[in-house]
């Protein structure tokens, strides 16, 4: 009898210990990789690789050596309701001769269904005005910030354009920045993204860089002597932003 009482007491105490120190439950999340494939005109099968030559709607001949952009504040929606956000996070997507990075990976997306993605191209005003607020991958010494106090470069093409006056290729700098030109994109997914616990999921986007110079506004690079740097707002940069505000398309989800 005494032995049975002792056994019951041990069992009771063990249960109490478990209650006081429960095993933490694992969060119900999955992994998501977003692909930002940097291309020129994917609708017509035209890719982009550093050093490729293109002709614009204005007849300018361009050699693009670098494409770089900040992707920020990624969000996922379902039926118009915000379900997940990666706030105050900044990722550099780029394709240059020395580096290629077209993927961003997240490991904390809640289990559930999603039908829309949102993200920004650029750096929001809070971080753009204070370069020492280096959230995510922000780095004022990484070649994506101006040397004077006007913040980060949001979207960059570096290369050459053919100058008909000198009959030679001259430097091309398409550098968009300033709070005015921070651009937010909302894109409906072509099919529902169902995130499962511990699952690996993907959203494949294509970036149509050719739109920057071509549609809906034809940008005359020759007239600007290749200097398309948004040091201040203006019609030229309004037109460029309008062009690249339509440069993303979603290819598929999986």
Image: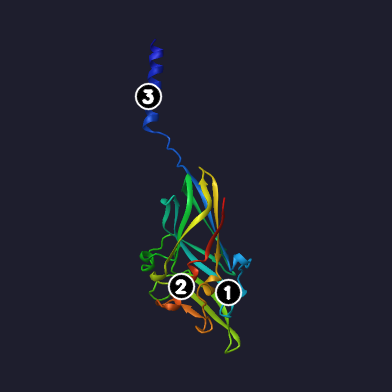
Q: Residue furthest front?
A: 216
Q: Residue furthest top?
A: 1
- Callout 2–callout 1 Cβ contact below 8 Å: no
Q: Residue at x 39, y 67 (%)?
A: 128
Is 209 placed left or right of 13 in the picture?
Answer: right
Separation of residues labelled 2 and 1 (CA atoms): 16 Å
The numbered dot on residue 176 is 2
Front position in the image: 16 or 95: 95
Front position in the image: 32 or 61: 61
Q: Position of residue 243 (x, y in %)?
A: 49, 71
* Above or below, comparing residue 218 to residue 41 in the picture: below
Q: Position of residue 95 (x, y in %)?
A: 57, 67
Residue 94 is at least partly visible in this image: yes
Look at mark 1 in the image and give the residue it sits on. Answer: 64
Secondary structure found at label 3: helix
Separation of residues labelled 3 and 2 (CA atoms): 66 Å
The numbered dot on residue 38 is none
* Above or below, comparing residue 14 to residue 30 in the picture: above
């Amino acid at each position: 009898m005494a032995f049975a009482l002792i056994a019951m007491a041990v069992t009771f105490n063990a249960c109490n210990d478990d209650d006081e120190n429960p095993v933490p439950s694992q969060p119900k999340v999955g992994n998501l990789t977003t692909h930002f494939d940097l291309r020129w005109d994917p609708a017509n099968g035209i890719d982009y690789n550093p050093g490729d030559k293109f002709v614009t709607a204005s007849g300018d001949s361009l050699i693009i050596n670098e494409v770089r952009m900040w992707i920020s504040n990624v969000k996922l929606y379902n039926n118009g309701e915000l379900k997940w956000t990666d706030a105050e996070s900044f990722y550099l997507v780029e394709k240059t001769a020395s580096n290629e990075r077209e993927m961003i990976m997240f490991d904390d997306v809640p289990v559930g269904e999603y039908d829309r993605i949102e993200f920004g191209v650029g750096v929001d005003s809070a971080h753009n005005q204070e370069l020492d607020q280096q959230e995510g991958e922000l780095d004022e010494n990484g070649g994506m910030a101006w040397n004077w106090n006007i913040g980060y470069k949001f979207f960059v093409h570096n290369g050459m354009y053919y100058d008909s006056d000198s009959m030679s290729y001259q430097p091309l700098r398409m550098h968009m920045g300033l709070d005015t030109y921070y651009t937010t994109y909302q894109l409906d997914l072509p099919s529902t993204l169902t995130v499962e616990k511990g699952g690996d999921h993907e959203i494949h986007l294509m970036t149509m860089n050719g739109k920057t110079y071509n549609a809906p506004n034809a940008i005359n690079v020759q007239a600007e002597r290749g200097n398309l740097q948004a040091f201040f707002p203006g019609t030229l940069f309004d037109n460029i932003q309008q062009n690249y505000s339509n440069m993303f398309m979603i290819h598929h989800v999986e």
